[in-house]
Image (cartoon, helix red, strand yellow):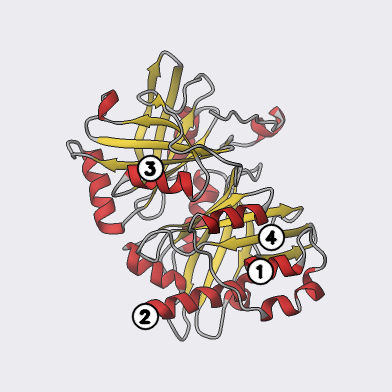
Amino acid sequence: MTQTTDHTPDTTRQADPFPVKGMDAVVFAVGNAKQAAHYYSTAFGMKRVAYSGPENGSRETASYVLESGSARFVFTTVIKAATDHGRFLAEHVAEHGDGVVDLAIEVPDARAAYAYALEHGATGLEEPYELKDEHGTVVLAAIATYGKTRHTLVERSGYTGPYLPGFVAAEPIVEPGDRLFQAIDHCVGNVELGKMNDWVGFYNNVMAFTNMKEFVGDDIATEYSALMSKVVADGTRKVKFPLNEPAIAKKKSQIDEYLEFYGGPGVQHVALNTNDIVATVRAMRAAGVQFLDTPDSYYDTLGEWAGETRVPVETLRELKILVDRDEDGYLLQIFTKPVQDRPTVFFEMIERHGSMGFGKGNFKALFEAIEREQERRGNL
């Protein structure tokens, strides 16, 4: 298992009422975890590191743990629902399709984090409890967030196993090649009309997150559709959660489409940090991943406003990679199409060079690209 080192000063930890160490895992409920794990191994270059299923005592669910650098995905499917947890997962897949059920956050003290969250208005889903095996002890607790999504609070400093007690180390599904990304950059949630500020307040109060960015009005609109977005983050900026809601416009926005087909609020996309977006996109395209298209006209004037980047404009044009620049630097980004048949969850690959933004300069081009796909699906 890849180990990450947390260099945040102790003084920052002490000053933060809800300290976090980073994203622990993005947990998906899926219809077929074995096939999902294979797809993310071959198409995303991830490496299976752990497994839980009937072979090692889990009679209700099968789970595959995949990693790429510090990014960890867990794919869980129900074999035969026998408890409330199994029934919840089975019903979640039936209602929402494959989707994210848990944005798990690593914390230095799960009991303290859970207590703080409840004191500040969170709905508790699981009180703190311990899991133990020969590798040590993990403390877990869980709170509710938008839709049926949860945040599991994970305290694993005393644990050396591959993931959690109950999981066994597992060999890669395919021979791993070059790593295509190394960390989770941010996780984006879509919420109902009029609810964005409520959930921003939730993260401000319950987890002591602060507001990082805000995009409203013309920032984030096209001729036909619009949305509003705010970004909340922990004090160290290791965990970032943009929150989107639809805005009134001529036609159905991408957020409206997501809410309709997902059946309510949920995680829209996960952004993944890469050190070489060109190599990453080439490898993922070769493995069959589909990315949103960008018209050639976007690149005709790109150099005039985005300036010089490490990737030549012609390569950006060839691979349909977007560029944005702000006062701190620039970033390169590209978005996949939805990775399941429902037009819901997708991914972003992002390479940062100083900029801590989210591609504001690309919003119009990105949303027009999404609208073209919506129109093809008959959902605009």
Q: Nearer the viewer, mark 1 or mark 3?
A: 1
Label 3 element class? strand
**What is the spatial separation of the Cα atoms under label 2 and label 1, in whole angstroms?**
28 Å
Using residue 300 as the reference point, say whether residue 150 is left or right of it: left
Q: Residue at x 37, y 80 (%)?
A: 378
Closer to the chain start, of discs 4 and 2, is 4
The residues bearing labels 1 and 4 have C-alpha atoms spaced at a distance of 14 Å
From mark 4 to mark 2, how far is it between C-alphas? 30 Å
Q: Amino acid at mark 3?
A: Phe
- On the image, numbered disc 2 is attached to which residue? 378
Residue that badge 1 annotates: 318
Q: Where is residue 340 drawn, in percent x and y?
A: 38, 59
Q: Which residue is mark 3?
A: 75
Mark 2, mark 1: which one is toward the viewer?
A: 1
The kind of residue tagged 2 is Gly
Crowding at dot 4, Cα within 10 Å, few <14 / some 14-19 / many 20+, comes out as many
Look at label 4 and name its amino acid. Answer: Leu
Q: Secondary structure at mark 4?
A: strand
Q: Are marks 2 and 1 in contact (CB under 8 Å)?
A: no
Mark 1 closeness class: few <14, some 14–19, many ≥20 residues within 10 Å: few
Q: Is residue 301 above or below residue 67?
A: below
Mark 1 or mark 3: name the one nearer the start of the chain. Answer: 3
Q: Which residue is mark 4?
A: 332
Q: Position of residue 367 (x, y in %)?
A: 55, 74
Q: In this view of the protein, which residue sits in the foreground, 216 or 363? A: 363
Amino acid at circle 1: Glu
Q: Nearer the viewer, residue 214 or 348?
A: 348
Q: Are marks 1 and 3 in contact (CB under 8 Å)?
A: no
Mark toward the start of the polypeptide (1 vs 4): 1
Q: Nearer the viewer, residue 32 or 249?
A: 32
